[in-house]
Amino acid sequence: MLRQLTRSMGPTSRLLKQVNYGTNAPAGTHIPVTKALEIGQWEEKLKAAGVEDRKFNVKCIVSHVLKQKFSSVPDSFDQLQLNPGQLADFERFLEARCARMPLQHIIGEWDFMDITLKTSPSVFIPRPETEEFMRLVIDDHKNAKHVDLLEVGCGSGAMSLSMLHSLPQVVATAIERSKAATVLAAENAKMLGLLNRFEVHNHTMEEDKYLPEALKDKKYDLIISNPPYVKTEEFQFLHPEVVVYENLNALDGGSDGLRVARLVFDLACRHLRPGGKLWLELGNDHPPMVKTIMNLKYEGRLKFIAGYSDQYQRERFVQIEKV
Ligand SMILES: C[S@@+](CC[C@H](N)C(=O)[O-])C[C@H]1O[C@@H](n2cnc3c(N)ncnc32)[C@H](O)[C@@H]1O
């Protein structure tokens, strides 16, 4: 979408006019990145817009515009030059960032563990904590001979595809309520050469309609999910990047944040093999609540194994076993 926007706004940069190259900058005219930053006052504009990690943001945009690996771009931007087309993109992308469009949507792709995924404006952006979560899940299954995996709510496909990429013995099925996310996950699987072990169904899990008709008798060794878990009352505290640009169906977990997770518990009772695992990424205060729910409601069917903390020492991940 952003690329279309860029094209429709034309290639002439305001900045080239400002530095007196004239409205029609001669072909081959280049401007140093440092100069473009200074004259455009981008540091000040990003700060005024409330963007944090400004150096990182600018470096990501520079590496994207110059089509250079992030790690090969010097922090000083020394020697780096932009031609008129690159400068137009550079300004457009920084303007979008000042409007708090997430970097991932501006760039159109994002690294998750060892894979690169395409992103799309209406599809949930995979988060760094989910990488931590997936390391735990992958580690727990690295010695298994074969794993039939089901993911509930796969978004871009980040979780299933990173697992397939790491472990050749895994075969994954995903369900996803958003059509756009379903299409994107399939595209990402194809791009990564993993489509032969991945299928995704556009299906909304509901009570008594947990899986699509074609999967209704299937059993799995592992179910993973990062369901919507933000409590409705917490929406007022979310950043503009999330509230304005993310699909709220991907986030809203109802009054206690566990509305979708509760459906996943019921689904796990029906579709996990005995001894199979359910791993969930949830909100800060959820693991103790899940432990209580397991003891009160699922005794003899599902057993709470453990809760795990993320790098910020917030207990966020749970492991449950089918009895
Ligand atoms: C928090 S996002 C996680 C996406 C992805 N797993 C990740 O970690 O990047 C939750 C996803 O679940 C999907 N979803 C929400 N409710 C669902 C339901 N009842 N059935 C299927 N998918 C659902 C949303 O559309 C969204 O893509």
Image: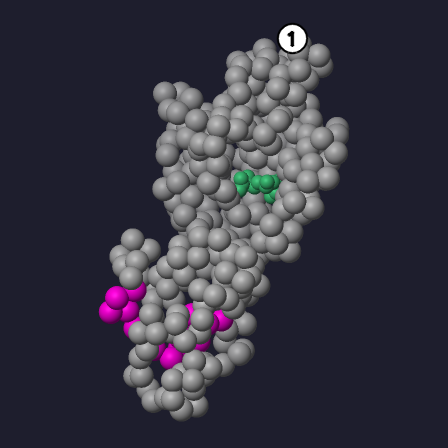
Q: Residues within 10 Å of mark 1 (few under 14, many from 20)?
A: few
Residue 113 falls in which quadrant of the image? top left
Q: From the image, tell me which residue sits under label 1.
A: 300
Q: How is the image coloured?
A: one colour
Foreground of the two, 112 or 55: 55
For residue 123, above or below residue 230 = below
Residue beneath the point at 37% across and 88% down: 21
Is 91 contained in the magenta span? yes
Figure label count:
1
What quarter of the picture does the N terminus occupy? bottom right
For residue 262, above or below residue 65 = above
What kind of element bears circle 1? loop
Residue placed furthest toward the left: 79
Q: Is residue 103 left or right of residue 113?
A: right
Foreground of the two, 12 or 177: 12
Q: Magenta region: which residues?
A: 77-93
User: Percent x, y for residue 319?
Assistant: 53, 21
Q: Is residue 60 visible?
A: no
The residue type indicated by label 1 comes to Gly
Residue beneath the point at 57% across and 63% down: 99
Residue placed furthest toward the top: 300
Q: Is residue 254 visible?
A: yes
